[in-house]
C-alpha cells in the first residue's frame, strides 16, 4: 500500500498545524482534536491531511467547562480533566499526542483501558514514551506540546514555523545535521499503520 517516511509525517503535521493556526487566529478553540478528527486522504501516492469536526467551540473566553466532556481521553490536556475550560494551549497538547500517534503508528495508550484510572494517570504526569528512532528535534517539540504547564507549550505560529522549516530542510539537496535526523532510513511506517491508527476513532 506504500510507506511513509519522516518527511511525509512532518508534512502531514505541518498541514494540521496550519489548519489549527487558522482556528486560533480567529480566536477560536477546536476543543476536540484527536486522531478521529484528522482526515487523511491517499490519492495517487499523495497524502493530504486536514482537521475535521471544527466549529464546535466558540471564542475561548466564553466557553463553559464540563466535567464530562472529555472527548477521547488520550488527547485531552490534563488541565481539562481538572475542570478547566479547553483553551488554545489544550489544543496544542492534543496536537502533541497526534505527533506521537503518527510517529508510533498506533493509538496513544492502546494497551490501557480508557477510563477514570487513565485520566488520573495523565493528570499525574503520564505521557507516552518517545519511540526509538524519533529525531531529537521532533521529540523535543512533541514533549513541549505535552508539557504539564500550558504556558510552556508552543503556539500554532511556532508549530507552523518549525514544521515548515523542517520540510524545507528535508527537501534541501545539501545534507545537514537536521536533515540527517529525518533520514528516511530512520523511520518507515506503512500507510496502513497510520491510516489504521487514525481510523480506529471513527464510528
Image (cartoon, grey):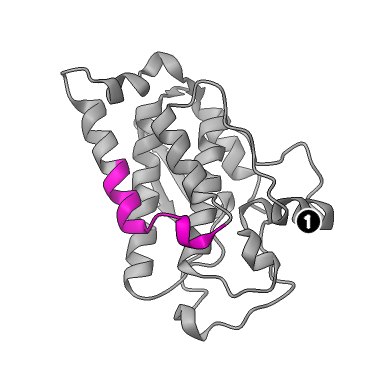
The answer to whether residue 102 is left or right of residue 4 is: right
Outermost residue, bottom direction? 62
Depth check: give the residue in front, 144 or 81: 144
The prevailing secondary structure element of the residues shown in magenta is helix
The quadrant the C terminus occupies is: bottom right
| Highlighted range, magenta | 149-163
Q: Secondary structure at mark 1?
A: helix
72 versus 196 height, above or below? below
Asked whether the viewer can see residue 49, the reply is yes
Give the quarter of the image for residue 112.
Answer: top right
Depth check: give the residue in front, 2 or 142: 142
Depth check: give the residue in front, 43 or 29: 29
The answer to whether residue 118 is left or right of residue 194 is: right
72 versus 141 height, above or below? below
Please name the residue shown 65% across and 43% down the image: 127
Please name the residue shown 78% across and 51% down the image: 118
The answer to whether residue 122 is left or right of residue 4 is: right
Local crowd size for mark 1, using a 10 Å CA cut-off: few (<14), some (14–19), many (≥20)? some
Please name the residue shown 41% across and 24% down the image: 5
Give the quarter of the image for residue 11.
Answer: top left
Where residue 162 appears, x then y in whole percent? 30, 43
Residue 136 within the segment the image draws in magenta = no
**What residue would you read off at disc 1?**
120
Amino acid at each position: 500500500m506504500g510507506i511513509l517516511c519522516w518527511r511525509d509525517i512532518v508534512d502531514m503535521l505541518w498541514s494540521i498545524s496550519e489548519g489549527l493556526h487558522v482556528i486560533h487566529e480567529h480566536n477560536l478553540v477546536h476543543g476536540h482534536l484527536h486522531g478521529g478528527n484528522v482526515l487523511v486522504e491517499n490519492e495517487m501516492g499523495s497524502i493530504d491531511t486536514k482537521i475535521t469536526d471544527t466549529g464546535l467551540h466558540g471564542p475561548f473566553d466564553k466557553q463553559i467547562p464540563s466535567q464530562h466532556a472529555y472527548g477521547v481521553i488520550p488527547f485531552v490536556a490534563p488541565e481539562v480533566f481538572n475542570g478547566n475550560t479547553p483553551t488554545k494551549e489544550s489544543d496544542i497538547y492534543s496536537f502533541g499526542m497526534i505527533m506521537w500517534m503518527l510517529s508510533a503508528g498506533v493509538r496513544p495508550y492502546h494497551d490501557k483501558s480508557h477510563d477514570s484510572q487513565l485520566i488520573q494517570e495523565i493528570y499525574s504526569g503520564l505521557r507516552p514514551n518517545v519511540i526509538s528512532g524519533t529525531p531529537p528535534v521532533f521529540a523535543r517539540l512533541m514533549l513541549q506540546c505535552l508539557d504539564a504547564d500550558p504556558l510552556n507549550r508552543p503556539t500554532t505560529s511556532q508549530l507552523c514555523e518549525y514544521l515548515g522549516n523542517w520540510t524545507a530542510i528535508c527537501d534541501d539537496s545539501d545534507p545537514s545535521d537536521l536533515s540527517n535526523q529525518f533520514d528516511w532510513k530512520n523511520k518507515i511506517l506503512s500507510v496502513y499503520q497510520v491510516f489504521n491508527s487514525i481510523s480506529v476513532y471513527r464510528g
